[in-house]
Image (tube, coloured by chain):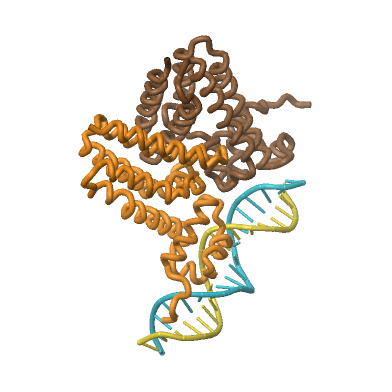
Chain colours: A brown, B orange, C cyan, D yellow
Amino acid sequence: MPAALISRDDAIARIAEVFREQGFEGASLSAITEASGLGKGSLYNHFPGGKEEMAEAVLSHVDAWFAREVYQPLRDAADTRTAIGDMFRAVDGYFRSGRRICLVGAFALDATRDRFAAAVQDYFAQWVEALAGCLKRGGAKQPRALAEAVVAGIQGALVLSRALDEPAVFTRQLRDLQARLISALA
Amino acid sequence: MPAALISRDDAIARIAEVFREQGFEGASLSAITEASGLGKGSLYNHFPGGKEEMAEAVLSHVDAWFAREVYQPLRDAADTRTAIGDMFRAVDGYFRSGRRICLVGAFALDATRDRFAAAVQDYFAQWVEALAGCLKRGGAKQPRALAEAVVAGIQGALVLSRALDEPAVFTRQLRDLQARLISALA
DNA sequence: GTCTATAGAGTGATAGAC
DNA sequence: GTCTATCACTCTATAGAC
């Protein structure tokens, strides 16, 4: 067989950006073929389930990134304060300081939500759980509510900064959320 | 002229729910005709600009509701504490305690964002400005950052509660946000 | 007759599936 | 590349208020 010019992972990462920018409905196959550099034939070879399978692959690609860079460090953290700083650094990097939106958040609001409900729910449930656990170990009161406030705050900051076209809103919110967490620790 | 069976406002309200649930791309004309009870002829008579004009009308319908029920009361408020309580009550009612998402927030993340950028930006800018002004008059420090945190918090709570399929998350966040505002007042 | 509101078959274009 | 379904949209026609 011929060597693949583009790895599956690489293709998924490129397709992810199409879904992120265009949403599920808005992401046309022609946009996906163009962005991925794969012809329709190759695409259906990799993703026999079509567009829906591509989106599933993209969602689990994102989930894997967060599991590795965010959830697991939160769970393994020796020092809560450091872990929180690391989380915010990772999040700020991932969302490009407010210039990139959350694909999973967008899918949560999307029409096609029901189709990907399980993956979307899992992403957020893991995030809240990992953060709440870390906060609890750090001695914070009401760690669950606090974790929900932070995850929601991040998502909302992405919505607001994109709506206002002001990435600084995101950066500022991240700073404030981090300060709230630190001050909630025992 | 014949009496309209459905008022324009009524039609817009019904169409709004289609866009809210399906997004701009996902809202097909057939879904819109079905939900509105209007044939294509009627729709194009009311909205010669087609789907885009329908979405514009829906956005300004939503904006008008918030201007009347949220922004103006915040601006006119004699008592800050009461005004804040009223805002949260209005918001909880509008979003059906977390069972209904924000159409404008969804459009902010949508692919078609650029098309409606002005309306989306205006909605959020007005909300933040009206709330910040009210907080400032109430003697809060950093009213702008606080207002952004609350508006973002509400949007994020909608994303999170929809993603987790737990409306209670929204209700709880609203309560916490309100408490934060009250305690920030002089 | 003129105008507005209505309906819906029919248009070409384009989507996703294969 | 081919196929079929569906898309947004146009057009023609009709009904009733003036």
Observer-nearest of A155 and B175: B175
* Residue B65 pos. (x, y %): 36, 55
Residue B143 visible in the displayed image: yes
Quarter in which the C terminus of chain B is drawn: top left
Observer-nearest of C7 and A3: C7
Name the outermost residue toward the right.
Answer: A1
Establish if D9 lies above or below B69: below
Observer-nearest of B55 and B63: B63
What residue is shown at x 42% (from left), y 47% (from top)?
A: B92
What residue is shown at x 38% (from left), y 47% (from top)?
A: B89
Residue A22 visible in the displayed image: no
* Residue A40 pos. (x, y %): 68, 41
What residue is shown at x 26% (from left), y 38% (from top)?
A: B135
* Residue A55 pos. (x, y %): 63, 38
Which corner quadrant of the image does residue A120 belong to?
Answer: top right
Q: How many marks?
A: 0
Quarter in which the N terminus of chain B is drawn: bottom left
Which corner quadrant of the image does residue B53 belong to?
Answer: bottom left
* Residue B99 pos. (x, y %): 51, 47
Which corner quadrant of the image does residue A39 belong to?
Answer: top right
Establish if A65 lies above or below A156: above
Name the outermost residue toward the top.
Answer: A78
